[in-house]
Image: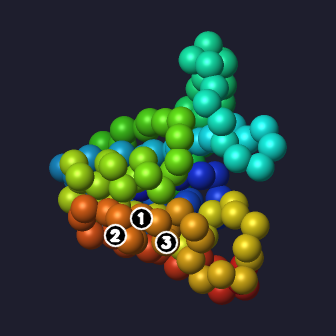
Amino acid sequence: MVVGIDGSDGSDEALRWALDHARNDDLIRAVYVWQIYRGATPEVVPSAELAEIRPEADHVVADAVKKALEGRAGPAPQIEQVSYYGHPGRWLAKLSAESDLIVVGSRGHGGFVGLLLGSVSTYVVHHAKCPVVVVPGNPTDR
């Protein structure tokens, strides 16, 4: 099971949902995909710069996992924490080819608050090669 993480409340809910529905022998891959914007679009970034920033990206995943595990009773499934550079929707759709389920929050940190689905969850729903669960966020956030 792959869970999209972006540090938002919605992705925290998605990870909690995955933990609640996983079996003890399941592997949950918590995935944070990030981009660097300088101007209006993401750009190609030198690998040395990516290496400098990667610890921050890994920290986002580690924080989300730590928060999701707080107060949980009993054993948790194995959680693999990974981060990638690139387009979040494309990465999650790519990872869906080797997964049995993708779990995402309905909205992340995007700027269009009134939408029911964010751009990443919409992309994943339309391009995934496996079933997708979109965990609804708090209705007051819309």
Return the residue nearer the eye: 45 or 25.
45
Against 33, is 6 above or below?
Answer: below
Residue drawn at (65%, 59%) of the image: 8
| Mark number displayed over residue 12 | none
Q: Which callout, 2 or 3, points at the residue further toward the start of the chain? A: 3
> Which residue, given by chain and number where applicable, does mark 3 sit on?
122
Q: Quadrant of the N terminus?
A: bottom left
> Label 3 neighbourhood size at 10 Å, few (<14), some (14-19), many (20+)?
some
Q: Residues within 10 Å of mark 2 (few under 14, many from 20)?
A: many
Residue type pointed to by label 2: Val
Q: Earlier in the sequence, mark 2 or mark 1?
A: 1
- Choose mark 2 or mark 1, whichever is in front: 1
Where does the image place residue 24, in percent across and percent down from the top left? 23, 53
Please name the residue that numbered disc 2 is placed on. Answer: 132
Please say whether residue 61 is visible from this viewpoint. no
> Hey, what amino acid is under mark 3?
Thr
